Amino acid sequence: MKNNLNLSLPTSVTCPACGMLCDDLVLNSTAPVSIQNACAKSISFFEQSFNTGSTNTAPSVAGKTTDLETAIKAAASILAKSKAPLIAGLGTEVQGMRAIMRLATTSNAMLDHMHSESSVRNTLTMQNGGWLTTTLSEIKNRADLILAIGTDIGSSHPRFFEKLVWDSSSLFDKPSPEVIYLGVPAEKTKAATSPTGKLASSVGDDPKHVPEIVNALNALLINKKIHAETVGGVAIATLQALVEKLKTAKYAVMVWSASSFKFSHAELTIQSIVQLVNQLNETTRAAGLPLNSGDGDSSVNNTSTWLSGYPTRNRFVDGKPEYDNHHFSTQKQLENSDALLWVSTFNPISAPQTTLPTVVIGHPDTKLERTPDVFIPVGIPGVDHAGAMFRMDSSITLPLKKLRNHELPNLSEVITKIEAELA
Amino acid sequence: MITLLKNGRLYDPAHNKNGVVEDIYIYQGRIVPKPLDNAKISQTYDLTGKVVMAGAIDMHSHIGGGKVNIARMMLPEYQQKQMQEIKNLSEPEAHICTPYCSHHATPTATDTGFRYIEMGYTAAFEPAISPINARQAHLEMGDTPMIDKGGYAMLGNDDYFLRMLTAKKDQKAINDYVAWILHATQTIGIKVVNPGGISAFKFNQRRLNLDENHQHYQVSPREVLQSLSRAVHELGIAKPLHVHCNNLGAAGNFQTTLDTMTASNGLPMHLTHIQFHSYGTEGDKKFSSAAAQIAEAINKNKNITADVGQILFNQTVTASGDSMMQHLNAKHANPKKSVIMDIECDAGCGVLPFKYRDQNYVNALQWAIGLEIFLSVEDPWRIFLTTDHPNGAPFTSYPHLIRLLMDKSFRNEAFAKLNLDAQSMSNLTSLDREYSLYDIAIMTRAGASKLIGMNERGHLGVGANADITVYTDQADREAMFAKPDYVFKNGELVVKDGAVVKVVWGATHTAKPAFDISVEKELKEYFDRYQTISLDNFKISDAEIFDDGRGSVVVNQN
């Protein structure tokens, strides 16, 4: 695909590569890709996008290259035969999800996002007891202590420390916050080392001990005695000292990433973190920040919620929405469903292995491990077409720009055409 | 193509028409004068005996944006239960469930539009758009069919404004900033929620009284109110400053509310969901009605308008920008859960499910207080019918509420079922007033459009957009207002016998007063330095609203 630019360079861009949604990037050139204020993740996203090349720009049916109209007809025919298709992946932004919601309503589809295994843990916590959370500008200007629980933050959200911790501009004249890692392996804690060499401190280094350590912090915070010398390999005295820091902090922020919790029932640990935040707020201020996983998960869940009343995992039965964040998982539904529509527009992520009739609408570079019945390459949001995207804290929605002119349709156009065939 | 609505009984307070039998002609979406005799009438509706009003306007209803979506997301069990209840049409503990009322407190964007239009409402305004979250609010409202919409932008807890107050910036600078916010957020009014208090909560202050200083900015809520009400007034937009007072829901807060009325120095000010701010501390339970004092003050201060925020008994969810007071009230949540957020040095939110019960002393008295205010405020042009959807009750309870106002015996029967202690603390049965159809038309049409500044809606005069609702006059006012015979949106028949017959998309109403664009220079520096998004992305363009081919932006001039 030629890099036929829609805008003159340099131009400011919003980066959809992670949930920070940084909009201070300036694109200087596309070949090679040169971007001011970019992180490794955004460079790799834009390189991948602008290098999207000569292959896979044409749709295919059963592995044979064809035109869009034929592919749309073939996709519609698979959906028409299906009683309850599974629409999964859902790597898209608000406009794409709006179109998918319309299609799901009329086709009695089930919806699940590729990262829901993680996001469901947060949703469950929020639905169970609620939570008290904060947003990025509050952290930047207000936080004096950041407790990163089980996540180094930097690998998934590379500019978190640069923008929110090391940047000394704060509205309220506060010192740069102390960063404490809890249950993060030593080799990963470098992510928070400031340009001036200030290191983060660590409490415990084994992610699998996070649940018991957080529980112990909760106990110590309400002055319960713990009859042990260590919890999860951490001395009680160390935990007590951490509790004191949390109590004296003016605005402590607990950051966690549901996807980094590799133990079962991680939602109980998230609840325990929320409990810590709630208890701290009895006397001082503190807040939580759940990191998202990416590929438009926040956008998809928000859009799904205002259009169906529920985040994913949900489905429509005779046009009525239903919700079950356990049974409506991709894994389970691959066994029960009779067709799969896989959507991944930001990244070339393959559909899961299945024998179901499969339609893939996705990134042009999608590797097709098993030839799907229908493959329709579409434009990349924020590169090939405009859109709107939710930041991980859900309070901010930003417009995505169209940077390049190209011949590929976007996801909503393809869905609209499929709907027209189905009508 | 001319449509004729023949022989209807018109209730059009904007033109002093109280049940006058007249014909209405519609051409190209608007009400037009009687055409020449030889003009071709393509369609005629015989409305003999029918009650005809302009489409109703809900001036305060939480229909879109972050906290509404949080409310939906956090309560899946509630929605599933409601689905079942709607199917069974069983009556819950109180007496407000009818076959017409779904009680769905957290409808989807689509359902919001449908439920409103089915009741003859043709516009609704989201009263609490935090500027930083405005894009989401517009996305949700963009997916709300059938009705016109718009919103009020929340200021007064944003760092930028509070910083200006501390720095004693002149009023012109404040005015420019306020106007810039209206443009940037595509809103039609300005709201302040718990002036200064949401911000103070972030600094660990737990309550903030009207004349108490915010510890960081060293400014008081009174100063916030004075500055913002003056800005709104001087900018010349119609909608007076929309005020959610300090001390929401707290016993004894009526004094704050009375004091707040004085803070505007005689300029127009709207006090919202005033029922939640009309509580005294009398009696054994230290919680009493101060409706009489509040109503008296409204009657006396002609610059004050208010909407009630009536509660009705059932499960609902409260979604507020007031993180300070919602955090304080989280212990009363039912089921016990709450989402509280600090947002971008701009705003906050607090979402708690609530179950109002008629046998609970406080809830029963809240119900009575709301009605006492409705019946004691003399001028229907200055009091508005709201439940603060979904905080007091879902907007689908409006027909029931209208019956409570119009039908004294129905009201007194309902009262007799309340908690007995609450009954003994209310003078409701001594209030004999019954609202007339004309009064209802003022509150829900003419008054609302005048307040917001939508000159072409809310009335039936020549030139108005033909948003028209036609009812069958029934003694049971709840049944009457729940199910209009016809609703016309921009002259098109969209509802027949209470059901949608055509899906249409309404406009987004805004106010865009002139201002000095150089205000952006400092704002840009502020965004670059302290915020985590750019100034350009903060602003919402017209194109974002109409790009999908359904929406449109109306700029209301005053």
Image (cartoon, helix red, strand yellow):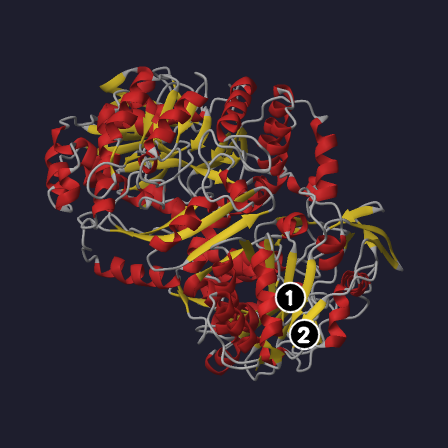
> Mark 2 or 1 closer to N-term?
1
Residue B506 at what x, y percent from top left?
46, 38
Instruction: Give the residue pinned by disc 2.
Output: A184
Pick the front one: B57 or B267: B267
Counting other residues with Cα less than 10 Å from the Cα at mark 1, is it few (<14), some (14-19), or many (20 or more)? many
Q: Are marks 2 and 1 in contact (CB under 8 Å)?
A: yes
The amino acid on which the numbered mark 1 sits, given as a three-letter code, is Ala
Residue at the extreme right = A32
Q: Residue at x 65, y 78 (%)?
A: A62
Chain for disc number 2: A
Q: Would you say residue B288 is visible in this rendering?
A: yes
Q: Quadrant of the N terminus of chain A?
A: bottom right
Q: Classify residue A332 as left or right of residue A248.
A: left
The amino acid on which the numbered mark 2 sits, given as a three-letter code, is Val
Instruction: Give the residue pinned by disc 1.
Output: A148
**Secondary element type, mark 2:** loop
Give the vertical position of A3 relative to A335 (above or below): above
Counting other residues with Cα less than 10 Å from the Cα at mark 2, is it few (<14), some (14-19), or many (20 or more)? many
